[in-house]
Image (cartoon, rainbow, N blue to C red):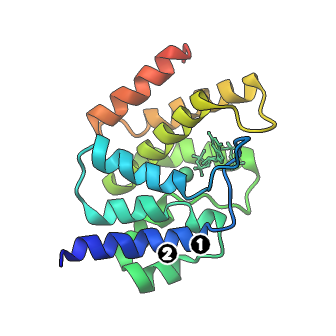
Amino acid sequence: MNSNTTVLLETVNFAAEKHRNQRRKDVEGTPYINHPIGVARIISYEGGVVDIEVLQAALLHDTVEDTDTSIAELELIFGPTVARIVQEVTDDKTLPKQERKRLQVEHAPHCSHQAKLVKLADKLYNLRDLNRCTPTGWTAERVQEYFVWASMVVRGLRGTHPTIEEKLEELFKQRGV
Ligand SMILES: Nc1nc2c(ncn2[C@@H]2O[C@H](COP(=O)(O)OP(=O)(O)O)[C@@H](OP(=O)(O)OP(=O)(O)O)[C@H]2O)c(=O)[nH]1
Ligand SMILES: [Mn+2]
């Protein structure tokens, strides 16, 4: 038995249970878990990254922000490194939205290499998702603003992973950002 396989399946199962009642903002109401799985897949399949703790953190990256999960719970089940990476990519939801967005830009350069990989893949997934379809209630201006803001965050993550960064730059170029 390959224990990394067991660990990854435990992790994806935990994330699926936590996100079980959540849907993406697209008209089809895609299950939310498609997003964390897709973020982990970008890091693994597209990025060639084999660091198991980064892949676990990618699967768990929105559990604390968007579900009843705590960092202490993640630390107990998945250990201190995975918990720390998720902590680094978790916004403080008690702050107003504009402040949270500003803090992502400010904090990005100071994140660990592992957290930067998760942040890059999270942005790449969400930008591709915006190209696929507009979330319900979003105007074209709001979509464009998300691209502009994401490019400011990604600027602070440069030098982390050349091929993932190239894919992001191509999407920004297409939008004139
Ligand atoms: N493109 C897209 N995004 C969707 C969809 N459904 C849910 N989201 C989530 O919405 C967030 C971006 O929307 P915003 O309005 O900027 O943020 P908010 O959810 O905090 O209000 C992302 O959160 P996040 O993953 O935490 O990343 P971040 O944007 O906070 O970095 C993304 O995962 C969808 O159908 N398409
Ligand atoms: Mn996310």
Counting from the top left corner in percent of width and height, residue 123 is at 50, 40
Per the image, label 1 sits on a secondary structure element best described as helix
**Front position in the image: 165 or 126:** 126
Q: Can residue 117 be seen in this view?
A: no
Q: Distance between the residues labelled 2 and 1?
A: 6 Å
Q: How crowded is mark 2: few (under 14 residues within 10 Å), some or many (20 or more)?
A: some
Residue farthest front in this picture: 28
Determine whether 38 is above or below 152 in the image: below
Ligand 2 within 8 Å of the CB at mark 1: no
Q: Secondary structure beneath disc 2?
A: helix
Name the residue at the right extreme: 137
Q: Mark 2 points at which residue?
A: 14
- Residue at numbered disc 1: 18
Q: In this view, does 81 lie above or below 85?
A: below
What amino acid type is highlighted by mark number 2?
Phe
**Residue at the spot 40% in from the left edge and 40% down from the top edge:** 157
Picture coordinates of residue 70, whole percent (x, y): 57, 77
- Which residue occupies 65% across, 75% down? 68
Q: Do the residues labelled 2 and 1 touch (CB within 8 Å)?
A: yes
The amino acid beneath tag 1 is Lys
Residue nearest the observer in this picture, 122 or 81:
122
Direction from residue 71 to residue 40 in the image, left or right: left
Query: Can residue 38 be seen by looking at this rendering?
Result: yes
| Furthest-left residue in this view | 1
Instruction: Give left or right: position of 77 versus 35.
Output: left
In the image, the residue with mark 2 has its CB under 8 Å from the nearest atom of ligand 2: no
On residue 122, which mark appears? none
Q: Residue at x 36, y 32 (%)?
A: 165
Task: Identify the residue at image location x=63%, y=68%.
Answer: 20
